[in-house]
């Protein structure tokens, strides 16, 4: 029957590791924003090469 | 001209209104922002743009390899009001301003979070996270879609904050920079604690459930008493952090309400939790049984889930009642050495300010130079600009609509007109009924009933069988733990808020929903509420203008941000060609003058036209608001602008009138009394020439007469009455633009839904009541078992989660069904909900 005790402790230890992982994830801010990542993945990864032409001057008369 | 505050840009508001009304434009729609291309400002075969601003942004993005922006969403852009002067943002490089804005700063990089209300789709997220392609000084930009925030990290030596903000503004994402953000630096996120509490409760719940399985299945006889003890001890240990940390909010609120001697629902919850743990510890330590720890942790877990859901809903809908959120952040101050941009909080009495067209006056001031033409529509709700001469006293909150003026402040910002209006004692809502939520009313009775039943059953068993007395007493407290009751109201109102939010109706808190259901009297404001400011209601009297001439008038009107010009522009826009204007002059309070295609065009008041040598026909009497037109010095006629009712107002008033007493208040004269009398019916009260204080008194008198009053208005002028009423509804042209002392913010396009909103609120409150009854039934069964001294852990483990879950399902399901029954529909276009 002692094997039950061992298994019990092992399962609790695993569960505690997961709890630790969860606490780390929360503190690292992984649950901060659950809305944006699903949108982010819709975009292509590489939008093409950056054109090195100078930026148009935004300082125009309006 | 640059508007002082992004949300107040009237052209954008009008375009937004246009988009809402869902008109399908005959003209091609702009490749960038999707607005109809009026005329042919930017002629292009395959790439139509509505304005130069949009074309510039499109060119900027495609040149920098950001063309995918247009693939993610057909017309993703925010209408770009064109490039703006970078000097406008120069105050952002001021160290005292930066100190308040930046989250982090060292000598190399700086980090900050900006609020960009324009974020609305996938393409926005993608573009804003690729900002480094537009400005290499930006290291990283991360969007928080739900909050409409972007977190920026930039190299200080490669770019400046003003450059970054100017670039954002140029591509159509002008950040909201307000006093509010300067005064209250962002607080650390409270979500982390809540998520940790929930996680820990889930961890405890799951593991204790596992340890309890032998008990459920009666396997204890196989495993023997040793394991039973071990499992019991483990469960006690696992439940302790859940009880202490996860449930800490319940302890705190229960303690607070005990100290204030108010019986909130948290008191019986805390009692129940304490009784559960105490009884379990007593059972386990004394080898009497396995305790109720699975029920305890499960309850805490479900309660926290409910609270998290409620909090998320409120966070998303959080809006700000603070008028400061709507003031510009900085103004240009004239000093001996020239001009400097200063934050408003640093303004002092006697400062000379240069106010450009479109900017808001931050404090009461005297006009020193120039001709002021102030639009007080944000203060009074009346859109008629007021012309002032040098030496005139100008009030805070007015927006300069003509050319640049110079003013000298006479009062500090904190003491100016608006603040004194705001701080007025009689404007404060009496705090009395604010604690009296439906849940609290029930819980007060509930707490006493539970304690009574527990005491009675203990007394009974003391007389019959003293051994069971303590168990019966604690069992009643355990079973009566009103978790289902606590979940019913927040979940129903949370779901109701989401339904409202999708319809662009924003409620301040749960209390508003309950009060809304009790409304029996509705007071309506006229200007800006029942009447709108759109294109209809503009008519022309005089020689009919040819399409070409109408185009000239339109071309001229487009250069001005005057409310009349804007309405004229909207009325003429379909079909009229637009040509470039040279020599444009706007004479504040008078009119516009410019040359279009070689022809001199004047728009303005008849008096001004007369003064500039235009022969006004004798017998011409302008009625109401009129804009006269002269082409090449010849009088052509006059546009009449009347304030039309918003669409569907008649149907709305009819449906409201059936159930509610109606009243109309207006700051205008009684010219239109007959029209509104026939609209509102004989029973309604109509009052004209009302000052803000009159409106406030009217509402207060109604409340004193025992009525539950809903006030529907807009503008700070109604703020007092809005606050005085039981439910203050602010009707805004653009959500987020302005929130005075209101309980509800209603998108103007959703005004016709007002009756359905009231209907739905009544249904939602009925759902809350039904939820109470449902959970009350569960409690009745449980208390019956407990008082009989028969409560076993397995009964508890089944009954309690069952009641919680069924109440959750009932609350969410029934609320959605009620929304369908009430006919409350989603706003169009579908708001960008995450």
Image: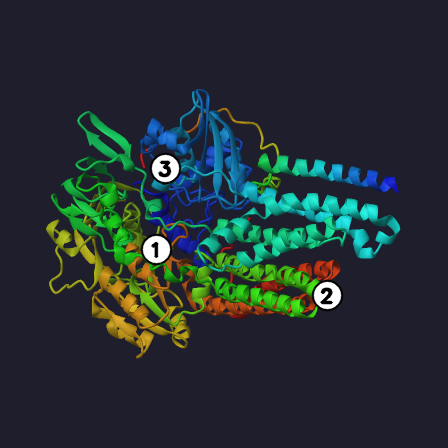
In primary-sequence order, the first of circles 2 and 3 is 3
Say if labels 1 and 2 share a chain: yes
**Residue B146 visible here:** yes
Instruction: Name the front one of labels 2 and 3.
Output: 2
Disc marking residue B615: none
Q: Is residue B590 visible?
A: no
Q: Position of residue B171 (x, y in %)?
A: 43, 37
Which label is found at residue B182?
3
Q: Are marks 1 and 3 on the same chain?
A: yes
Name the residue nearer the viewer: B550 or B759.
Answer: B759
Badge 1 is on which residue? B741
* x, y percent for residue B770: 57, 69
Quadrant housing residue B244: top right
Which is nearer the N-term, disc 1 or disc 3? 3
The residue under label 2 is: B790
Distance between the Cα atoms at labels 1 and 3? 21 Å
Asked if badge 2 and badge 3 are on a common chain, one would say yes
The CA distance from mark 1 to mark 2 is 54 Å
* Viewer-nearest residue: B648 or B439: B439
How far is mark 2 from mark 3, CA to CA?
Answer: 61 Å
Crowding at mark 1 (Cα within 10 Å: few <14, some 14-19, many 20+): many
Q: Name the outermost residue toward the bottom.
A: B682
Would you place residue B175 above or below residue B610 in this image?
above
What secondary structure is found at the residue carrying circle 1? loop
Mark 3 secondary-structure assignment: helix
Q: In which chain is the residue bearing label 3?
A: B
Q: Quadrant of residue B597?
A: top left
Is residue B570 rendered to the left or right of residue B827?
left
């Amino acid at each position: 029957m002692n094997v039950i005790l061992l298994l019990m402790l092992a399962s609790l230890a695993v569960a505690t590791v997961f709890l630790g992982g969860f606490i780390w994830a929360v503190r690292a801010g992984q649950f901060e924003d659950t809305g944006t990542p699903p949108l982010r993945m819709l975009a292509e990864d590489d939008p093409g090469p950056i054109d090195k032409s100078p930026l148009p001057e935004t300082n125009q008369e309006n | 001209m640059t508007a002082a505050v992004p949300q107040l840009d009237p052209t954008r508001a009008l375009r937004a209104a246009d988009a809402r009304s869902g008109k399908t434009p005959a003209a091609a729609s702009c490749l960038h922002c999707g607005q109809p291309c009026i005329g042919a400002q930017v002629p292009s075969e395959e790439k139509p743009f509505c304005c130069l601003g949009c074309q510039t942004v499109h060119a900027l993005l495609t040149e920098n390899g950001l063309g995918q922006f247009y693939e993610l969403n057909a017309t993703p852009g925010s209408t770009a009001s064109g490039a703006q002067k970078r000097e406008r943002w120069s105050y952002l490089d001021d160290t005292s301003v930066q100190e308040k804005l930046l989250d982090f700063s060292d000598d190399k990089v700086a980090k900050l979070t900006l609020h960009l209300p324009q974020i609305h789709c996938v393409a926005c997220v993608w573009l804003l996270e690729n900002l480094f392609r537009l400005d290499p000084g930006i290291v990283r930009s991360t969007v928080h879609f739900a909050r409409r925030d972007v977190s920026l990290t930039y190299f200080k030596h490669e770019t400046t904050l003003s450059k970054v903000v100017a670039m954002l503004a140029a591509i159509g994402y002008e950040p909201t920079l307000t006093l509010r953000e300067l005064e209250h630096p962002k607080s650390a996120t409270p979500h982390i604690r809540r998520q940790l509490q929930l996680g820990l409760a889930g961890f405890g719940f799951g593991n204790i459930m596992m340890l309890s399985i032998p008990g459920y299945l009666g396997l204890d006889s196989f495993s023997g008493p040793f394991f039973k003890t071990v499992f019991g001890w483990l469960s006690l240990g696992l439940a302790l952090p859940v009880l202490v940390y996860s449930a800490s909010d319940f302890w705190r609120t229960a303690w607070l309400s005990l100290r204030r001697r108010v019986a909130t629902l948290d008191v019986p919850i805390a009692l129940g939790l304490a009784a559960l743990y105490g009884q379990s510890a007593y059972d386990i330590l004394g080898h009497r049984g396995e305790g109720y720890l699975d029920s305890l942790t499960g309850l805490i877990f479900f309660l926290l889930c409910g609270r998290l859901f409620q909090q998320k809903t409120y966070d998303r809908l959080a809006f700000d009642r603070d008028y400061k959120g709507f003031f510009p952040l900085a103004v240009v101050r004239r000093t001996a050495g020239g001009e400097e941009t200063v934050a408003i909080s640093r303004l002092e009495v006697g400062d000379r300010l240069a106010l450009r067209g479109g900017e808001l006056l931050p404090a009461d001031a005297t006009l020193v130079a120039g001709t002021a033409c102030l639009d007080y529509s944000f203060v009074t709700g009346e859109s008629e600009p007021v012309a002032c001469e040098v030496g005139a006293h100008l009030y805070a909150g007015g927006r300069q609509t003509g050319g640049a003026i110079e003013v000298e402040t006479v009062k500090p910002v904190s003491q100016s007109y608006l603040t004194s209006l705001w701080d007025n004692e009689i404007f404060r809502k009496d705090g009395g009924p604010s604690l009296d939520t439906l849940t609290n009313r029930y819980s007060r009775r509930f707490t006493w009933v539970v304690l009574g039943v527990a005491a009675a059953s203990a007394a009974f068993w003391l007389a019959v069988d003293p051994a069971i007395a303590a168990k019966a007493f604690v069992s009643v407290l355990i079973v009566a733990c009103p978790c289902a009751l606590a979940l019913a109201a927040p979940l129903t109102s949370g779901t109701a808020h989401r339904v409202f939010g999708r319809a662009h109706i924003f409620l301040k808190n749960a209390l508003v929903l309950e009060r809304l259901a009790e409304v029996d009297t509705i007071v309506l404001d006229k200007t800006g509420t029942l009447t709108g400011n759109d294109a209809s209601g503009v008519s022309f009297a005089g020689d009919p203008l040819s399409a070409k001439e109408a185009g000239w008038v339109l071309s001229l009107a487009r250069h001005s941000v005057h409310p009349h010009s804007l309405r004229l522009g909207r009325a003429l826009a379909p079909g009229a060609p637009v040509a470039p204007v040279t020599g444009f002059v706007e004479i504040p309070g008078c009119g516009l003058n410019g040359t279009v295609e070689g022809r001199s065009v004047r728009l303005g008041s008849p008096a001004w036209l007369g003064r500039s040598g235009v022969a006004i026909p004798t017998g011409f009497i302008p009625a109401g608001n009129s804009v006269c037109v002269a082409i090449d010095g010849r009088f052509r006629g006059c546009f009449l602008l009347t304030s039309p009712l918003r669409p569907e107002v008649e149907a709305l008033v009819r449906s409201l009138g059936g159930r509610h007493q109606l009243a109309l208040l207006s700051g205008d004269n009684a010219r239109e009394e007959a029209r509104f009398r026939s609209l509102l019916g004989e029973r309604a009260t109509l009052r004209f020439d009302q000052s803000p204080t009159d409106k406030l008194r009217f509402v207060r008198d109604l409340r004193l007469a025992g009525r539950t009053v809903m006030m529907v208005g807009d503008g700070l002028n109604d703020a007092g009455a809005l606050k005085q009423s039981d439910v203050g509804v602010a009707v805004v042209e653009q959500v987020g633009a302005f929130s005075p002392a209101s309980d509800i913010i209603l998108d103007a396009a959703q005004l016709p839904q007002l009756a359905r909103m009231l209907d739905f609120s009544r249904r939602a409150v009925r759902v809350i009541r039904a939820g109470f009854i449902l959970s009350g039934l569960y409690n009745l069964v449980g208390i019956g078992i407990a008082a009989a001294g028969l409560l076993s852990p397995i009964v508890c483990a089944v009954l309690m989660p069952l009641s919680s879950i069924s109440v959750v399902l009932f609350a969410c399901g029934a609320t959605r069904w009620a929304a369908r029954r009430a006919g409350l529909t989603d706003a169009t276009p579908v708001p960008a909900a995450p």
